[in-house]
């Protein structure tokens, strides 16, 4: 289990989730945040974990992973769109690409 407390294994600081959640909601102008959106963010976080280092003491993404915020933002935004909470629907991949470009320039695009 992950926790927000840094003195335990699997600390999950806000820097992993909050930027991506907020960016995804803002990009699509979401009118609502619910558990489905938060679960999408959690799944995106889980997908970023390096499987080679996965263990009971290591279930969270590396704190320096550059994939976390763009993937969480994309998952949050697309879930808000699917649920009908988006005032500005965007095509799949656009939230990811826009945030990646904002954070890192376009030195590497995955889509």
Image (tube, rainbow, N blue to C red):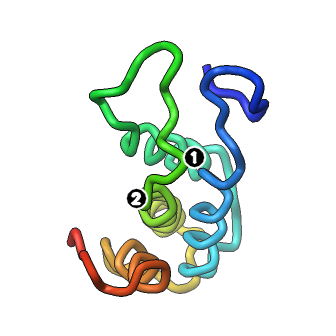
Q: How far apart in space, not on screen, are marks 1 and 2 (Cα)?
A: 21 Å
Helix, strand or loop at mark 1: helix
Q: Name the residue rendered at 51%, 62% in the picture.
A: 69
Above or below, comparing residue 27 to residue 70 in the picture: below
At 68% from the left edge and 58% from the top edge, which residue is drawn?
18
Quadrant location of the N terminus in the rendered image: top right
The residue that label 1 is drawn on is 36
**Element assignment for label 2:** loop
Residue 58 position, x and y percent, is 49, 24
Residue drawn at (65%, 38%) of the image? 12
Closer to the camera in the image, 65 or 1: 65
- Quadrant (top left/top right/bottom left/bottom right) for the C terminus: bottom left
Residue linked to disc 2: 67
For residue 63, the mark is: none
Residue 98 vertical placement versus 34 (above, below): below
Q: Is residue 65 placed above or below 91 in the rendered structure?
A: above
């Amino acid at each position: 289990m992950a926790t927000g407390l840094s003195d335990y294994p699997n600390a999950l600081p806000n820097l992993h989730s909050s930027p991506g959640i907020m960016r995804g909601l803002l990009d699509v102008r979401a009118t609502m945040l619910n558990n489905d959106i938060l679960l999408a963010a959690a799944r995106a976080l889980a997908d970023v974990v390096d499987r080679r280092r996965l263990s009971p003491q290591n279930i969270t993404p590396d704190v320096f992973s550059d994939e976390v915020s763009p993937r969480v933002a994309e998952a949050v935004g697309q879930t808000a769109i699917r649920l009908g909470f988006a005032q500005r629907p965007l095509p799949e991949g656009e939230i990811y690409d826009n945030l990646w470009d904002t954070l890192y320039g376009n030195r590497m695009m995955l889509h």
